Amino acid sequence: MRDPEAERGSWLAALAVGARRAGHSLEGSALEQNSFTDTAFAYYGDLFVRPQAQGGTASLDDAAGEDEALRLLLEEVIDTQLPSCSSEEERRVLQDAHAQLTAAGRQAQGSGELVRRLVNVCTTLLALPGIRRGGQWASGRLMVGHLAQVTRYLARAELDDGRTLDERIRGRVLSFMDESRPTVVIAHSLGSVVALEALHQHRGPIPLLVTVGSPIGMRTVVHPRLRPQPPATPDCVGRWLNYWDRDDIIAPRPWLERDVLPNTGGCQPVSGRVDSDGIWVHTATKYLAQASVAGPVVEALRLAGESAPA
Protein backbone atom coordinates (compact mmCIF):
# COMPACT_ATOMS: atom_id res chain seq x y z
CA MET A 1 0.00 0.00 0.00
CA ARG A 2 1.07 3.59 -0.57
CA ASP A 3 2.40 5.82 2.20
CA PRO A 4 0.04 8.82 2.55
CA GLU A 5 2.74 11.10 3.93
CA ALA A 6 5.14 10.19 1.14
CA GLU A 7 2.37 10.78 -1.40
CA ARG A 8 1.58 14.18 0.08
CA GLY A 9 5.27 15.06 -0.12
CA SER A 10 5.52 14.04 -3.76
CA TRP A 11 2.38 16.00 -4.68
CA LEU A 12 3.67 19.11 -2.89
CA ALA A 13 7.08 18.78 -4.55
CA ALA A 14 5.45 18.53 -7.99
CA LEU A 15 3.13 21.44 -7.21
CA ALA A 16 6.18 23.47 -6.15
CA VAL A 17 7.78 22.83 -9.55
CA GLY A 18 4.62 23.95 -11.31
CA ALA A 19 4.31 27.01 -9.07
CA ARG A 20 7.81 28.15 -9.95
CA ARG A 21 7.10 27.60 -13.64
CA ALA A 22 4.01 29.78 -13.22
CA GLY A 23 6.07 32.59 -11.68
CA HIS A 24 5.23 31.89 -8.03
CA SER A 25 8.75 31.18 -6.77
CA LEU A 26 8.12 32.14 -3.13
CA GLU A 27 4.99 30.02 -2.94
CA GLY A 28 6.86 27.19 -4.65
CA SER A 29 9.50 27.16 -1.94
CA ALA A 30 6.83 27.30 0.77
CA LEU A 31 4.93 24.42 -0.83
CA GLU A 32 8.06 22.31 -0.98
CA GLN A 33 8.55 22.86 2.75
CA ASN A 34 4.81 22.34 3.43
CA SER A 35 4.65 25.77 5.05
CA PHE A 36 2.41 27.59 2.58
CA THR A 37 -0.91 26.26 3.86
CA ASP A 38 -2.43 23.33 5.73
CA THR A 39 -2.42 20.27 3.49
CA ALA A 40 -3.70 16.72 3.75
CA PHE A 41 -3.62 13.66 1.50
CA ALA A 42 -6.90 11.76 1.74
CA TYR A 43 -5.73 8.18 1.23
CA TYR A 44 -8.29 5.40 0.86
CA GLY A 45 -6.32 2.68 -0.93
CA ASP A 46 -6.38 0.50 2.18
CA LEU A 47 -10.18 0.29 1.94
CA PHE A 48 -9.86 -1.70 -1.29
CA VAL A 49 -7.97 -4.49 0.50
CA ARG A 50 -10.30 -7.26 1.59
CA PRO A 51 -9.85 -8.49 5.18
CA GLN A 52 -8.69 -11.94 4.05
CA ALA A 53 -5.97 -10.58 1.75
CA GLN A 54 -2.43 -11.59 2.68
CA GLY A 55 0.31 -9.02 2.95
CA GLY A 56 -2.11 -6.09 2.83
CA THR A 57 -2.49 -6.17 -0.96
CA ALA A 58 -5.47 -6.65 -3.22
CA SER A 59 -5.61 -9.90 -5.17
CA LEU A 60 -6.66 -10.51 -8.75
CA ASP A 61 -9.88 -12.08 -7.44
CA ASP A 62 -10.88 -8.65 -6.10
CA ALA A 63 -11.68 -7.67 -9.69
CA ALA A 64 -14.05 -10.61 -10.17
CA GLY A 65 -17.75 -9.82 -9.99
CA GLU A 66 -17.29 -6.58 -11.86
CA ASP A 67 -15.33 -8.27 -14.63
CA GLU A 68 -17.77 -7.32 -17.43
CA ALA A 69 -17.72 -3.68 -16.32
CA LEU A 70 -13.94 -3.84 -16.33
CA ARG A 71 -13.99 -5.25 -19.87
CA LEU A 72 -16.26 -2.42 -21.01
CA LEU A 73 -14.00 0.13 -19.35
CA LEU A 74 -10.95 -1.24 -21.19
CA GLU A 75 -12.92 -1.32 -24.44
CA GLU A 76 -13.79 2.36 -24.13
CA VAL A 77 -10.18 3.24 -23.32
CA ILE A 78 -8.95 1.46 -26.44
CA ASP A 79 -11.74 2.60 -28.78
CA THR A 80 -11.34 6.27 -27.89
CA GLN A 81 -7.54 6.12 -28.12
CA LEU A 82 -7.31 4.44 -31.54
CA PRO A 83 -8.41 7.41 -33.71
CA SER A 84 -5.71 9.66 -32.24
CA CYS A 85 -2.72 7.33 -32.51
CA SER A 86 0.51 9.27 -32.94
CA SER A 87 2.55 6.38 -34.36
CA GLU A 88 2.18 3.06 -36.15
CA GLU A 89 3.60 1.30 -33.10
CA GLU A 90 0.88 2.77 -30.91
CA ARG A 91 -1.80 1.80 -33.42
CA ARG A 92 -0.50 -1.76 -33.66
CA VAL A 93 -0.44 -2.20 -29.86
CA LEU A 94 -3.99 -0.85 -29.48
CA GLN A 95 -5.29 -3.02 -32.33
CA ASP A 96 -3.69 -6.11 -30.78
CA ALA A 97 -5.21 -5.26 -27.40
CA HIS A 98 -8.63 -4.72 -29.01
CA ALA A 99 -8.47 -8.12 -30.74
CA GLN A 100 -7.55 -9.81 -27.44
CA LEU A 101 -10.36 -7.99 -25.67
CA THR A 102 -12.93 -9.09 -28.25
CA ALA A 103 -11.75 -12.69 -27.97
CA ALA A 104 -11.85 -12.51 -24.17
CA GLY A 105 -15.48 -11.40 -24.24
CA ARG A 106 -16.43 -14.35 -26.47
CA GLN A 107 -14.37 -17.10 -24.88
CA ALA A 108 -14.20 -16.40 -21.14
CA GLN A 109 -16.35 -18.65 -18.98
CA GLY A 110 -16.85 -18.59 -15.23
CA SER A 111 -16.26 -15.94 -12.59
CA GLY A 112 -12.71 -14.67 -12.65
CA GLU A 113 -11.80 -16.21 -16.01
CA LEU A 114 -12.55 -12.98 -17.87
CA VAL A 115 -10.42 -11.03 -15.40
CA ARG A 116 -7.48 -13.33 -16.06
CA ARG A 117 -7.90 -12.77 -19.78
CA LEU A 118 -8.07 -9.02 -19.20
CA VAL A 119 -4.68 -9.25 -17.55
CA ASN A 120 -3.31 -10.34 -20.93
CA VAL A 121 -5.00 -7.34 -22.57
CA CYS A 122 -3.40 -5.00 -20.05
CA THR A 123 -0.03 -6.69 -20.54
CA THR A 124 -0.35 -5.84 -24.24
CA LEU A 125 -1.30 -2.23 -23.42
CA LEU A 126 1.84 -1.92 -21.32
CA ALA A 127 3.78 -2.11 -24.58
CA LEU A 128 2.53 1.39 -25.46
CA PRO A 129 5.65 3.60 -25.55
CA GLY A 130 4.53 6.13 -22.94
CA ILE A 131 3.33 3.55 -20.43
CA ARG A 132 6.38 1.36 -20.97
CA ARG A 133 8.82 4.18 -20.22
CA GLY A 134 6.82 5.52 -17.30
CA GLY A 135 6.88 2.27 -15.36
CA GLN A 136 3.88 2.97 -13.08
CA TRP A 137 2.55 -0.54 -13.67
CA ALA A 138 5.08 -3.35 -13.60
CA SER A 139 2.60 -5.93 -14.90
CA GLY A 140 -0.82 -6.45 -16.42
CA ARG A 141 -2.03 -7.75 -13.04
CA LEU A 142 -1.22 -4.43 -11.37
CA MET A 143 -2.92 -2.48 -14.14
CA VAL A 144 -6.08 -4.60 -13.84
CA GLY A 145 -6.07 -4.14 -10.08
CA HIS A 146 -5.81 -0.38 -10.48
CA LEU A 147 -8.61 -0.16 -13.05
CA ALA A 148 -10.78 -2.54 -11.04
CA GLN A 149 -10.85 0.01 -8.23
CA VAL A 150 -13.01 2.20 -10.48
CA THR A 151 -15.54 -0.57 -11.14
CA ARG A 152 -15.53 -1.72 -7.51
CA TYR A 153 -16.24 1.79 -6.27
CA LEU A 154 -19.11 2.22 -8.74
CA ALA A 155 -20.58 -1.20 -7.92
CA ARG A 156 -21.96 0.27 -4.63
CA ALA A 157 -21.32 -3.08 -2.93
CA GLU A 158 -18.88 -4.69 -0.44
CA LEU A 159 -20.76 -3.93 2.76
CA ASP A 160 -18.72 -3.48 5.94
CA ASP A 161 -20.11 -2.09 9.19
CA GLY A 162 -23.34 -1.25 7.39
CA ARG A 163 -21.70 0.88 4.68
CA THR A 164 -20.76 0.03 1.11
CA LEU A 165 -17.20 0.47 -0.16
CA ASP A 166 -18.02 3.72 -1.96
CA GLU A 167 -19.69 5.14 1.18
CA ARG A 168 -16.64 4.32 3.28
CA ILE A 169 -14.33 5.93 0.72
CA ARG A 170 -16.38 9.14 0.58
CA GLY A 171 -16.53 9.20 4.36
CA ARG A 172 -12.74 8.95 4.52
CA VAL A 173 -12.33 11.86 2.12
CA LEU A 174 -14.90 14.04 3.89
CA SER A 175 -13.18 13.41 7.24
CA PHE A 176 -10.23 15.46 5.98
CA MET A 177 -12.39 18.50 5.22
CA ASP A 178 -13.40 21.32 7.55
CA GLU A 179 -16.75 22.90 6.65
CA SER A 180 -15.89 26.07 8.60
CA ARG A 181 -13.11 27.14 6.22
CA PRO A 182 -12.52 27.27 2.46
CA THR A 183 -10.75 24.24 0.99
CA VAL A 184 -8.99 23.80 -2.35
CA VAL A 185 -9.46 20.22 -3.58
CA ILE A 186 -7.14 18.46 -6.04
CA ALA A 187 -8.45 15.10 -7.22
CA HIS A 188 -6.70 12.58 -9.46
CA SER A 189 -8.07 9.66 -11.50
CA LEU A 190 -10.69 7.73 -9.48
CA GLY A 191 -10.27 10.46 -6.87
CA SER A 192 -12.08 12.84 -9.21
CA VAL A 193 -15.12 10.54 -9.18
CA VAL A 194 -14.93 10.29 -5.39
CA ALA A 195 -14.57 14.06 -5.03
CA LEU A 196 -17.49 14.78 -7.34
CA GLU A 197 -19.79 12.58 -5.28
CA ALA A 198 -18.39 13.45 -1.84
CA LEU A 199 -18.63 17.20 -2.39
CA HIS A 200 -22.38 16.88 -2.90
CA GLN A 201 -22.41 16.04 0.83
CA HIS A 202 -20.07 18.88 1.81
CA ARG A 203 -21.39 22.23 3.02
CA GLY A 204 -18.17 24.20 3.36
CA PRO A 205 -16.87 26.48 0.57
CA ILE A 206 -14.70 24.94 -2.16
CA PRO A 207 -13.30 27.94 -4.05
CA LEU A 208 -11.44 25.65 -6.47
CA LEU A 209 -11.79 22.01 -7.48
CA VAL A 210 -9.02 20.70 -9.73
CA THR A 211 -9.37 17.32 -11.41
CA VAL A 212 -6.54 15.68 -13.36
CA GLY A 213 -6.57 12.45 -15.37
CA SER A 214 -10.29 12.07 -14.72
CA PRO A 215 -12.42 9.17 -16.03
CA ILE A 216 -15.69 11.00 -15.22
CA GLY A 217 -16.57 11.37 -18.91
CA MET A 218 -16.30 7.64 -19.71
CA ARG A 219 -19.81 7.03 -21.00
CA THR A 220 -19.97 3.23 -20.88
CA VAL A 221 -19.04 2.45 -17.28
CA VAL A 222 -18.42 5.62 -15.27
CA HIS A 223 -20.78 8.41 -16.30
CA PRO A 224 -24.04 6.38 -16.12
CA ARG A 225 -23.16 5.13 -12.61
CA LEU A 226 -22.34 8.48 -11.05
CA ARG A 227 -24.53 9.82 -8.27
CA PRO A 228 -26.58 11.91 -8.38
CA GLN A 229 -27.93 11.57 -11.92
CA PRO A 230 -27.61 13.49 -14.10
CA PRO A 231 -24.10 14.37 -12.87
CA ALA A 232 -23.82 18.01 -11.78
CA THR A 233 -21.23 20.24 -10.17
CA PRO A 234 -21.63 20.26 -6.37
CA ASP A 235 -23.16 23.49 -5.09
CA CYS A 236 -20.21 24.12 -2.76
CA VAL A 237 -17.78 24.44 -5.69
CA GLY A 238 -17.02 27.95 -6.92
CA ARG A 239 -14.66 27.03 -9.76
CA TRP A 240 -13.79 23.70 -11.38
CA LEU A 241 -10.72 23.25 -13.58
CA ASN A 242 -10.20 19.90 -15.29
CA TYR A 243 -6.89 18.98 -16.95
CA TRP A 244 -6.06 16.19 -19.36
CA ASP A 245 -3.14 15.03 -21.47
CA ARG A 246 -3.58 13.45 -24.88
CA ASP A 247 -1.30 10.59 -23.83
CA ASP A 248 -3.30 9.80 -20.69
CA ILE A 249 -5.33 6.72 -21.62
CA ILE A 250 -7.32 6.89 -18.36
CA ALA A 251 -8.92 10.17 -19.45
CA PRO A 252 -10.19 9.22 -22.92
CA ARG A 253 -13.18 11.62 -22.82
CA PRO A 254 -11.69 14.72 -21.21
CA TRP A 255 -14.24 17.46 -21.92
CA LEU A 256 -16.18 17.14 -18.67
CA GLU A 257 -18.27 20.25 -19.36
CA ARG A 258 -20.06 18.15 -22.00
CA ASP A 259 -21.07 15.58 -19.38
CA VAL A 260 -21.53 17.49 -16.10
CA LEU A 261 -24.26 20.07 -15.51
CA PRO A 262 -23.60 23.42 -13.79
CA ASN A 263 -24.51 23.90 -10.15
CA THR A 264 -27.02 26.44 -8.88
CA GLY A 265 -24.31 29.11 -9.03
CA GLY A 266 -23.61 28.39 -12.69
CA CYS A 267 -20.25 26.67 -12.12
CA GLN A 268 -19.33 23.71 -14.30
CA PRO A 269 -16.01 22.13 -15.33
CA VAL A 270 -13.66 24.01 -17.61
CA SER A 271 -11.30 21.56 -19.30
CA GLY A 272 -7.81 22.34 -20.52
CA ARG A 273 -5.13 20.24 -22.18
CA VAL A 274 -1.57 19.98 -20.91
CA ASP A 275 1.35 18.42 -22.75
CA SER A 276 3.86 16.42 -20.75
CA ASP A 277 7.28 15.21 -21.79
CA GLY A 278 5.76 12.17 -23.50
CA ILE A 279 6.58 9.72 -20.71
CA TRP A 280 3.67 8.02 -18.91
CA VAL A 281 1.44 10.92 -17.98
CA HIS A 282 -1.37 9.55 -15.81
CA THR A 283 0.45 10.13 -12.53
CA ALA A 284 -0.80 13.13 -10.54
CA THR A 285 2.70 14.57 -10.20
CA LYS A 286 3.02 14.92 -14.00
CA TYR A 287 -0.02 17.16 -13.98
CA LEU A 288 0.81 19.14 -10.84
CA ALA A 289 4.23 20.10 -12.21
CA GLN A 290 2.55 21.96 -15.08
CA ALA A 291 2.42 25.76 -14.74
CA SER A 292 -1.14 25.85 -16.08
CA VAL A 293 -2.25 23.54 -13.27
CA ALA A 294 -0.18 24.84 -10.36
CA GLY A 295 -0.72 28.53 -11.09
CA PRO A 296 -4.48 28.61 -10.40
CA VAL A 297 -3.99 26.33 -7.38
CA VAL A 298 -1.47 28.68 -5.79
CA GLU A 299 -3.68 31.70 -6.45
CA ALA A 300 -6.74 29.95 -4.98
CA LEU A 301 -4.76 28.86 -1.90
CA ARG A 302 -3.57 32.41 -1.34
CA LEU A 303 -7.12 33.79 -1.55
CA ALA A 304 -8.49 31.00 0.63
CA GLY A 305 -5.89 31.80 3.28
CA GLU A 306 -6.82 35.48 3.21
CA SER A 307 -10.54 34.74 3.60
CA ALA A 308 -10.23 32.01 6.25
CA PRO A 309 -11.49 32.92 9.75
CA ALA A 310 -8.76 33.85 12.20
Image (tube, rainbow, N blue to C red):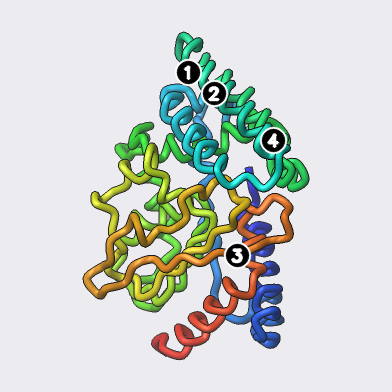
Q: Are marks 2 and 1 in contact (CB under 8 Å)?
A: yes
State whether residue 25 is above or below residue 41: below
Residue position marked by numbered label 1 in the rendering: 105
Q: Amino acid at mark 4?
A: Leu
Residue position marked by numbered label 3 in the rendering: 274
Q: CA distance from mark 4 to mark 3?
A: 22 Å
First in sequence: mark 1 vs mark 4: 1
Q: Secondary structure at mark 4?
A: loop
Q: CA distance from mark 1 to mark 3?
A: 34 Å
In front of the other: 27 or 287: 287
First in sequence: mark 2 vs mark 3: 2
In front of the other: 51 or 152: 152
Q: Is residue 92 left or right of residue 163?
A: right
Residue position marked by numbered label 4 in the rendering: 126
Quarter residue 38 falls in: bottom right
First in sequence: mark 4 vs mark 3: 4
What residue sits 41% from the left and 66% below the top?
Answer: 177
Nearer the camera: disc 4 or disc 2 = 2
Disc 1 crowd rating (10 Å Cα; few below 14, some 14-19, many 20+) is some
First in sequence: mark 4 vs mark 2: 2
Q: Secondary structure at mark 2?
A: helix
In front of the other: 120 or 63: 120
Image quarter where the C terminus lies is bottom left
What residue sits 36% from the left and 34% below the top?
Answer: 155
Task: Find residue 294 and report its horizontal and vertical position in percent.
Answer: 59, 74
Q: CA distance from mark 1 to mark 4?
A: 20 Å
What residue sits 29% from the left and 54% below the top?
Answer: 231
Q: Is residue 14 left or right of residue 111?
A: right
State whether residue 74 is above or below residue 271: above
Residue 201 in view: no
Q: Is residue 125 left or right of residue 194?
A: right
Q: Amino acid at mark 1?
A: Gly
